[in-house]
Image (spheres, rainbow, N blue to C red):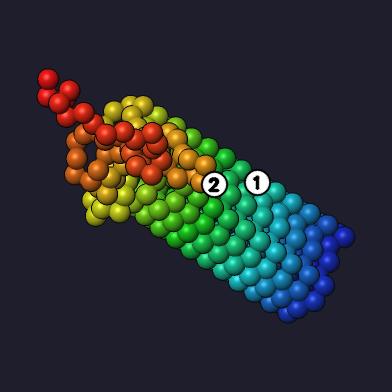
């Protein structure tokens, strides 16, 4: 059904699809139970089931899927597909797909996919690539979570590439691995898969937990084999120089008498 004052609007097919009043120049291509609400002109629903573009969300698009909603004031926003994804007061926002992803009260944000990912109020210009149960919280604008599981950004311009249970609370901070906690501004925190939190302790700190040891390589041979650098063995408090006997030449016997003199 196309209501009055929805001029130049089209419903291509399907069943029980509706374009309401003053949603002019809008299109529903097909599907079932899809709605473009009043005052959402120039909007499009490609198909699917029970998808909805609400009032004052003009120039918005839902490609398909099931139960995806672009809610009030989310102008020029897009949901590609998936199930139960929602944009609420999120102008210029994008959710490409996935399940139960939400952008709430934040402009120009994007969620690539995944399950149960959230970008919250005033975290504008932020991105979650995918994963499950990741969240960018209020005021964490320009933040990025690449993916992973249960990662959270609370700091502006903060980054979590992925991993598990990481948090970047400091501004311009980065947390990666497992249970890395970048709690201070400007910190880089890298944590291995030890079953405990590993947290920053000061602003602009670079902190690494690597209980299996650390190796820094500064040179390789013609085959790409490391020959120079340093290592910090597991459990050690002292650095050791990397050494490869096969990369050395011009060996000579030691004069034991001179050594003892």
Quadrant in the rendering for residue 61 = bottom right
Contact between labelled residues 2 and 1, with CB atoms less than 8 Å apart: no
Q: Which residue is mark 1?
A: 92
Residue 168 appearing in the image: no
Considering the image in quadrants, where does the C terminus appear?
top left
Q: Position of residue 141 (x, y in %)?
A: 50, 37
Left or right, 120 with reference to 27 = left
Q: Which residue is mark 2?
A: 127
Residue 238 appearing in the image: yes
Q: Residues within 10 Å of mark 2 (few under 14, many from 20)?
A: many
Q: Position of residue 120 (x, y in %)?
A: 47, 47
Of residues 190 and 175, the one nearer the viewer is: 190
Task: Count up the numbered dots.
Answer: 2
Left or right, 105 with reference to 167 = right
Q: Position of residue 147 (x, y in %)?
A: 48, 54
Residue at the location (60% across, 62% down)? 97
- Which badge, 1 or 2, comes first in the chain's sequence? 1
Residue at the location (31% across, 49% down)? 192
Q: Secondary structure at mark 2?
A: strand
Q: In the picture shown, does residue 66 fall above or below 213? A: below
| Marks 1 and 2, how far apart at CA | 13 Å
Considering the image in quadrants, where does the N terminus appear?
bottom right
Residue at the location (74% across, 67% down)? 46
Of residues 28 and 178, the one nearer the viewer is: 178
Label at residue 226: none
Residue at the location (83% across, 66% down)? 10
Q: In the picture shown, does residue 156 fall above or below 69? A: above
Q: Position of residue 213 (x, y in %)?
A: 28, 45
């Amino acid at each position: 059904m196309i209501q009055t004052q929805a001029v130049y609007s089209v419903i291509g097919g399907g069943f029980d699809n509706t374009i309401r009043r003053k949603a002019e120049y809008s299109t529903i291509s097909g599907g079932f139970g899809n709605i473009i609400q009043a005052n959402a002109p120039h909007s499009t629903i490609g198909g699917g089931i029970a998808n909805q573009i609400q009032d004052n969300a003009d120039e918005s698009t839902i490609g398909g899927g099931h139960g995806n909603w672009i809610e009030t004031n989310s102008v020029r926003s897009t949901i590609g597909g998936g199930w139960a994804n929602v944009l609420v007061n999120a102008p210029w926002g994008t959710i490409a797909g996935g399940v139960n992803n939400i952008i709430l009260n934040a402009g120009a944000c994007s969620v690539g996919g995944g399950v149960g990912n959230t970008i919250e109020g005033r975290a504008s210009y932020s991105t979650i690539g995918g994963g499950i149960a990741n969240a960018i919280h209020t005021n964490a604008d320009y933040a990025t979570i690449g993916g992973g599981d249960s990662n959270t950004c609370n700091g502006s311009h903060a980054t979590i590439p992925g991993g598990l249970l990481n948090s970047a609370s400091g501004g311009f901070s980065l947390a990666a691995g497992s249970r890395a906690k970048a709690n201070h501004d400007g910190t880089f925190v890298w944590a291995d898969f030890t079953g405990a939190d590993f947290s920053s302790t000061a602003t602009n700190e670079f902190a690494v937990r690597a209980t299996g040891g650390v190796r820094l390589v500064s040179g390789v041979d013609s085959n790409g084999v490391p020959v120079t650098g340093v290592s910090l063995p597991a459990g050690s408090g002292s650095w050791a120089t990397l050494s490869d006997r096969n990369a050395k030449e011009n060996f000579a016997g030691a004069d034991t008498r001179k050594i003892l003199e």
